Amino acid sequence: MTGFLKGLFVLLLTAVVFGGGGYYTYLLYIHPEIELQQDQSSPAPALPAFTDPTVAEYQKCLQVESVGDPLAARRSYTEFLEAYPDSSKAEEARMRLGAIQSALLLCPKATPDKQVVIVKPGDVLNKLSHKLLTSPELLAEINRLENANLRVGQRLFSVPANFTAVIDRTAAKVVVLRGGEFFTQYPIVATQGNARIGPPKKGVAAPITAKVQDKPGWKDGQRISFGERGFRESARWVVMVPSGHTLYGVAQETGEALPKPPSGYGVSPEAVRELSALLRKNDAVTIK
């Protein structure tokens, strides 16, 4: 009997020793490998989609604009861009702000930044525009003048012509600055000749300092100048020096024929019309 108990004890001890070793072997080697295989076969947890918190603020700007108060909309977009210059909606906000600012300035209506002038005897357009630090073309565009003739007692709106422009070839847009601050911008929709848009092929292209040389109009294939009959309805160019960087209008409808320069950047007809009014001869244009 005693021998039987001793044998049973030895058998149990052996089971404990080898069983414990097997269990720890399972914990150290087999179990982690099973978990790894399970982790690899399980789909990765989905990351939460990125949401730009400034989108809600941009939506507020759109709501202000929808009310129909352009001054309030201008203020709203300006404050949005000052607060969130890197927002995913910043470019859209600049486009909408620019359109609002152009529409406010280039219309015969009173705004806080316009001066009201009453034409006096002896006033002519060139003389009056020089006195007001503006240009005849800008006065004519704001007040929808059909020609250069003025009437005594006529009420005109005027703003100083203090605009410059940047032709941003990488971003394919023309940006207009007023007193060094953003005013409006227009997308470049086509190119002609040697003009290019998009990133430079090699390195970083050095900016070109240019200036406005001429602003002709074209009607029925004939070149006309400001003050001549038909200029208001004409297709416009803004010609720069050095040559090769003319801004011109691109036809919006099939079959519409607009003149193209040998080399330049195409924008909408309305955009080049506004540029022709805003920029004076010899105004600075940076091409980058």
Image: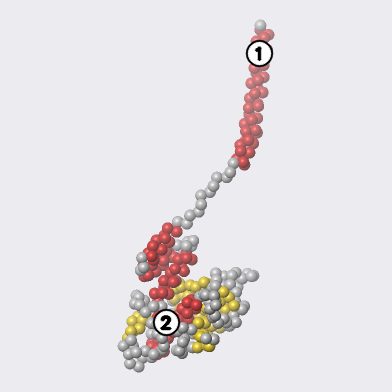
The total of numbered circles placed on residues is 2
Q: Which mark is residue 234?
A: none
Query: Observer-nearest residue: 51 or 192?
Result: 192
Residue type of the residue flagged with mark 1: Leu
Asked whether residue 288 appears in the rendered view, the answer is no
SS assignment at label 1: helix
For mark 1, what is the residue? 8
Amino acid type, residue under disc 2 in the picture: Glu
Give the left or right position of residue 251, taking residue 53 as reference.
right
Badge 2 is on which residue? 141
Q: How is the image coloured?
A: secondary structure
Q: Quadrant of residue 54?
A: bottom left
Residue lying farthest to the left in this orientation: 153
Image position, residue 19 (x, y; %) = 65, 23
- In the displayed structure, would residue 90 be above or below residue 21? below
Which residue, as the protein is rendered here, is positioned at the far front? 255
Residue 200, given in percent of the width and then of the height, sits at: 61, 71
Which quadrant of the figure contains the C terminus?
bottom right
Badge 2 or badge 1: first in the primary sequence = 1
Q: Nearer the viewer, residue 85 or 197?
A: 197
Residue 51 spot, x, y in % from top left: 48, 54
- What residue lies at 35% left-to-right and 83% top-to-bottom? 156
Taking the spot 61% from the left edge, 78% from the top edge, the residue there is: 193
| Quarter of the N terminus within the rendering | top right
